[in-house]
Image: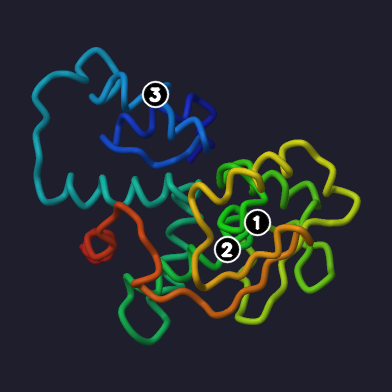
Amino acid sequence: MAKYRGPVCRLCRREGEKLFLKGSRCMTEKCAIERRSYPPGQHGQGRQRTSDYSLQLREKQKLRRIYGLQERQFRGVFERAERQTGVTGEALLRLLESRLDNVAYRLGFGASRREARQLVSHGHVTVNGRKLNVPGALVRAGDVVAVRERSRNLVTIQAALESVDGRGVPEWLELDKAGFTGTVRALPTKDQITLPVNEQMVVELYSR
């Protein structure tokens, strides 16, 4: 599947709710959902047919777009979640939240997951003192995620950290804003992951 390079606000409109793909812009009146809360395209305001499959598909697409994964990547994460013990849906969310690009976003190093992913890919982030440029790498409890010292004067990082208080840092992470450092206290539980997604529908879709 080709990588999507179009306007990300179009994705939010397709799902009918904010996915917070553009950072602080999503909190303002400029958000596309605030102005046009219907799907894009010439038939966007027409009557939409629904079925069990379409509802499950929309939940999967929503979750995939929130974390910015292509279908093959997302399927790989799901298969890994299936192999773990416990509830598959909860394991899926835990794996997605444990990705390095998501942790960098949650700590406020990037204004959006897309921005955080770019920072990781360009080598601006370290894990336990070592540079790691793989966005999909999984962090573990006790890991220390930080911005490289030579990158701390980047305007994008400083601006993102200034606005992180507005959305808050999850309780499973600990942020030292002055030191551009965050610590993974523990892997997140289902109750600590707040997303507008029904993960059980995703499991049902892949179980067909």
Circle 1 residue: 135
Circle 3 residue: 29
Tell me whether circle 1 and circle 2 mark residues in contact (CB < 8 Å): yes
CA–CA distance in space, label 3 to label 2:
30 Å
Amino acid type at mark 2: Arg
**Residue 152, horizontal then vertical, whole percent:** 83, 49
Foreground residue among 168 and 25: 168
CA–CA distance in space, label 1 to label 2:
7 Å
Secondary element at tag 1: loop
Circle 2 residue: 99
Q: How many marks?
A: 3
In the displayed structure, 139 sits above or below 112; it is below
Amino acid type at mark 3: Glu
Identify which residue is drawn at 64% across, 43% down: 160
Instruction: Report whether 41 appears left or right of 102.
Output: left
For the residues carrying marks 3 and 2, which lies nearer the camera in this image? Answer: 3
Identify which residue is drawn at 68% across, 66% down: 182
**Residue 184, horizontal then vertical, whole percent:** 61, 74
Question: Where does the C terminus fall, quadrant-wise?
Answer: bottom left
In the displayed structure, 169 sits above or below 50; it is below
Identify which residue is drawn at 38% across, 33% down: 11
Tell me whether circle 3 and circle 2 mark residues in contact (CB < 8 Å): no
Q: Residues within 10 Å of mark 1 (few under 14, many from 20)?
A: many
N-terminal of the two: label 3 or label 2?
A: 3
Identify which residue is drawn at 59% across, 43% down: 163
**Residue 92, horizontal then vertical, whole percent:** 40, 68
Numbered badge on residue 96: none
Foreground residue among 127 and 71: 127
Instruction: Report whether 138 appears left or right of 133.
Output: left
